[in-house]
Amino acid sequence: MHQQHSPYMEARFEESLGAGLAPARLAFYNSKDRKARERIHWLFNPNKDERVSTLLAWIQEVSPSLGAFGLNKFLQGRERGALFVNAEYRPAHSPEQPAFDWLTYDQIHPTFDRILQESIAYYDVHTQVLVFVFLLSKSGNSMAMWRRKLILPNNLRLTFGAQITQAKAGLRKQYPIYLDE
């Protein structure tokens, strides 16, 4: 785990480097045994779990800086993706902060989840950054998922418009949606 500094704004957030995602491997990718709709649940009330509601409120509070962090990830990789955060995971060296992972479309399509794939495939990279918060079931075989669309601040869009446009021009024209239904 380490802090990634965004050159676009003074935005520092913890990255889990996969540690926050590791316990969710079965819930994300176990398509041989269970369909996506049985593994990834979208309609749970976030207020039923304090970790989730607190994390979602914090994301809203820091959304301009977190948006800059996500924009930095997009511009570095030049591929559609989103920030993911496990509501249960905190790095040992920084237990007060959530830790994020950037997953690209190619890393998400094997989930066979329509909402994840369509969200990442079709969001407007010029104006938004996506953040997905998940909470695993006790067994680790399924998860509840919440999506937040962060609007990029105007100053970022103006300052980095040329870089965003250039990166956007290199994106695929179509992103197939893979389903297990």
Image (cartoon, rainbow, N blue to C red):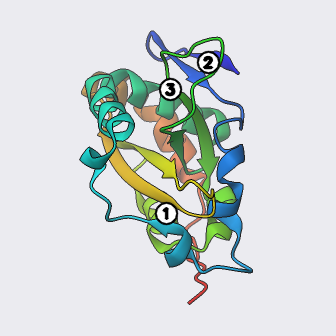
Is 135 in front, or is 28?
135
Question: Which residue type does callout 3 highlight?
Answer: Pro
Tell me which numbered mark, 1 or 3, is placed earlier along the sequence: 3
Measuring 53% from the left and 40% from the top, which residue is drawn there? 86
Q: Mark 1 points at which residue?
A: 116
Q: Where is residue 175 in the image (x, y as percent from the top left)?
A: 57, 70
Is 145 in front, or is 71?
145
Mark seen at residue 98: 3
Q: Position of residue 96 (x, y in %)?
A: 48, 15
Q: How many residues crowd mark 2 within 10 Å: few (<14), some (14–19), many (20+)?
A: some
Say what secondary structure mark 1 lies in. Answer: helix
Question: Which residue type does callout 2 highlight?
Answer: Gln
Q: Name the residue under label 2.
A: 4
Look at the numbered discs 3 and 2 and tell me whether their residues touch, using CB distance below 8 Å.
no
C-alpha gap between disc 3 and disc 2: 13 Å
User: Which dot, 1 or 3, sits closer to the camera?
Assistant: 3
C-alpha gap between disc 2 and disc 1: 24 Å
Measuring 62% from the left and 62% from the top, which residue is drawn there? 27
Q: Position of residue 41 (x, y in %)?
A: 43, 66
Tell me which numbered mark, 2 or 1, is placed earlier along the sequence: 2
Look at the numbered discs 2 and 1 and tell me whether their residues touch, using CB distance below 8 Å.
no
Whether 40 is drawn above or below 56: the answer is below
Question: Which residue type does callout 1 highlight?
Answer: Leu
Say what secondary structure mark 2 lies in. Answer: strand
Q: How many residues crowd mark 3 within 10 Å: few (<14), some (14–19), many (20+)?
A: many
